[in-house]
Image (spheres, rainbow, N blue to C red):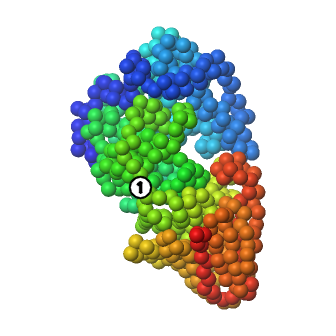
Amino acid sequence: MIYELLKEKNLAEILSENATNRLLPEYGDRKSWDSLPVGVKQFFTNKAGKLKDKQYMILPATVYMEYTRTGDRAIYENIYFERREDLITLTIAECINAKSEYIDQIINLVWAICEETSWVPSMHNNKGELPDIEYEIYVDLFSAETGAIMAWVYYFFGDIIAQNAPTVKRRVEIEVDKRILTPYLQYNHFWYMGLETKDTVNNWNPWINSNVIIAFAIFEKSEKNIKRLIQGIEKTAKITDVFINSYHADGACDEGPGYFGAAGAALFDYLEILSDITSGKINIYDNGLIKNMAGYIYKVYIGKDSFVNFADGPSRSGAPAKLLARVGDAVGDENLTGFANELIAKSGDNKNYSVGFHTYRYIKSLFQKENHDKKFIPPKVCWFDGTQILTARDNEGSIDGIFIAAKGGHNDESHNHNDAGHFILYCDGNPVIIDAGVETYTKKTFSDDRYDIWTMQSGYHNLPKINGFDETNMPNGRYRRATDVIYKHENNNTTGLSMQLKDAYPETARIDSYIREFVFKHGISFTVRDKYILKELATEPFVFNLMCANKPVINENNVQLGENIKMTFDSAVFFASIDEIELTDQRLLKDWQRKYLYRIRLTEKELKKENDMIICFEKRK
């Protein structure tokens, strides 16, 4: 897609020595930097003032090794990321003040980062407890981010650093080339490239490409290096095409909204950078898939601060609002622009301008003028046929009332949870039946023991245990899936989704058929119907699990879920109980802002070979 477009054009003619001037205002562009809002200037000046004399510790080998020893990645990450965030903060502050007040500390941090044995942090180092200096240099997420940060420092202050410490300027050139540019061009087998491996690509692909292209544009911008710049751009395009082609036509991110900022949004970072350095001559914003990928994020928006958090993601995941406003304009999606405007307006005066990851995105946003002409209309129903995700609400244009999301899918998705057939329900933008999300990442999260973590298991999603078995993803996880998925939307009043889920469970569950059907009568009720048939009489009872944000109150044949939702069930067939789940993980505590979640368990009173059950959710009038 992008690569083919590049080959049709003459990049050598499009690019020029001043191509990078189209990226961000240079240090000497006082008109642009002086025009930044007062709040932005004060934020960075105040923050940089506290960093000017800050001392930075070395990165000990034992701290790097902590990940392999205990699985704790945060100990090293905290030091690693702090340096980079401080460097970009000082960089922006110096661009604002233009008094050389922070140049020495910028030089100190640049030198310290150059001194690091590897820019690949411990959790991505797969060659032992410490970086192997004799092995090939790997370009991972955060080494690419580091390369981009160093490129911006070089872009803004290269000449000033050369006047103060010419060795530092040359060191930056050498290190970025050695750690980023050369290995990126040299190797094709890095899994996220999708060129020589069979690995499914994910957010790593556009995230890395959106940073690598910056490094090429800034360090290879001279006429002498134009061939290498073209090589770099063409390779990023070829690799980014792999990511785009991995998406279904519906544009949905199977990693969930929590990863949209690093996946779909990173793609738009890349496309924006590519368009900028080619004076708009290379862009694919009119492509239907690209438009769908852009619109995905507002279609999984629930209300308030919440998004449909299937896969690894918090319920409050947010979105890069100013980038989305630019993308909405670029692809011609007024509802996306309106959605972005709503997010920007919600931030009010409590704005944190900190720049961490995706530096181009955030620095460019500092200069962006706000325009709130476009308004957001929450869609009533959205169906993603490729990823088999449904979102629906009572009424178009309002977050009031019931909102539901349901999925088919398979159990080998990126950042997968065993959750084929799962659903959630919110009322007036508040959580009722939920997806718990994901705990703080550790070594275990991405190991063979991933599904020992409770948040990954189907028993802690809104799914049943059948004949004593939960869903699994082993063996052949992609085939552990929903089949015969049928979506219906009738007369704008009723939305339905049905699927066969027997393949999501192991053969030892002895399931002949398990059909789940969702029926949403907008403004009236939402029902879940489960019909199972076993090959013989069950040895353990059917148990329907429901994860709840608030403590349920069980009555004779119904459960009160918070103030507004009542769930009815057949008490003659099922016994209802409640598990209290204490949250101890800091990521979950921050997301849910409470100490406990709850699980309703509807357990059949008798062992059966087959059954047909219905639960119904209604909003109290």
Q: Say which residue appears at 60% left-offset and 85% top-offset.
A: 612
Is 532 on the left or on the right of 67, as rendered? left
Q: Position of residue 358 (x, y in %)?
A: 49, 37
Residue hosting label 1: 377
Is 326 on the left or on the right of 357, as rendered? left
Q: Say which residue appears at 52% left-offset and 55% top-offset.
A: 303
Is 602 on the left or on the right of 505, as rendered? right
Residue 55 visible? The answer is yes
Q: Position of residue 491 (x, y in %)?
A: 38, 75
User: Local crowd at mark 1 within 10 Å, few (<14), some, or many (≥20)?
Assistant: some
Q: Position of residue 475 (x, y in %)?
A: 59, 69
Farthest top residue?
163
**Is 18 situated above or below 615?**
above
Residue 127 visible? The answer is no
Among the 4 quarters of the image, the one containing residue 422: bottom right
Among the 4 quarters of the image, the one containing residue 23: top left
Q: Say which residue appears at 76% left-offset and 57% top-offset.
A: 582
The residue lying toward the viewer, choosing from 605 and 102, is: 605
